[in-house]
Image: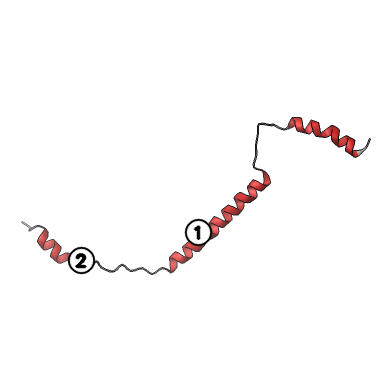
Amino acid sequence: MYATQALTHLVPLAAEELDKNKVTPGVLGFLVFAALAVGVWALMKSMNRHMGRVNFEEAPDPDAKPAAESEATASPRK
């Protein structure tokens, strides 16, 4: 018996064992998911590094009244 003949007899047996209603992502799906996870991790690490370099000090609002004036005019104390 040749190897090709043995394969043709064994392939239908293997095909019957597979569940035809079950779909799996396989190795390619895992590799794509892993690449996306590594990319998100790298972006988060880069964002944290850039956010750490930000030195932000908010300027006071020029239209706002000083705190002492707003308390005195808001309501007199009894």
Quick one: which residue is furthest to the right in this view?
1
Amino acid type of the residue tagged 1 in the rendering: Met
Residue 75 pos. (x, y %)? 9, 57
Quarter of the figure with residue 76: bottom left
Amino acid type of the residue tagged 2 in the rendering: Asp
Q: Is residue 1 left or right of residue 75?
A: right
Task: Name the quadrant of the N terminus.
Answer: top right
Residue neighbourhood size for the residue with mark 2, other residues' Cα within 10 Å, grouped as few (<14), some (14–19), many (≥20): few
Identify the secondary structure beneath mark 1: helix
The first of marks 2 and 1 along the sequence is 1
Residue 10 pos. (x, y %)? 83, 33
Q: How many numbered marks does the figure carry? A: 2
Quarter of the figure with residue 14: top right
Point out the frontmost of discs 2 and 1. 2
Name the residue that disc number 1 marks.
44
* Residue found 85% across the figure and 32% down from its top: 9
Which label sits on residue 63?
Answer: 2
Q: Is residue 20 placed above or below 25 in the rendered structure?
A: above
Report, in whole angstroms, how far the alpha carbon at label 2 lies from the one at label 1: 38 Å
Q: Is residue 21 left or right of residue 46?
A: right
Q: Is residue 47 left or right of residue 38?
A: left
* Residue found 41% across the figure and 68% down from its top: 54
Which label sits on residue 73?
Answer: none
Residue 27 pos. (x, y %)? 68, 46
* Residue found 69% across the figure and 31% down from its top: 20
* Residue found 36% across the figure and 68% down from its top: 56
Identify the secondary structure beneath mark 2: loop
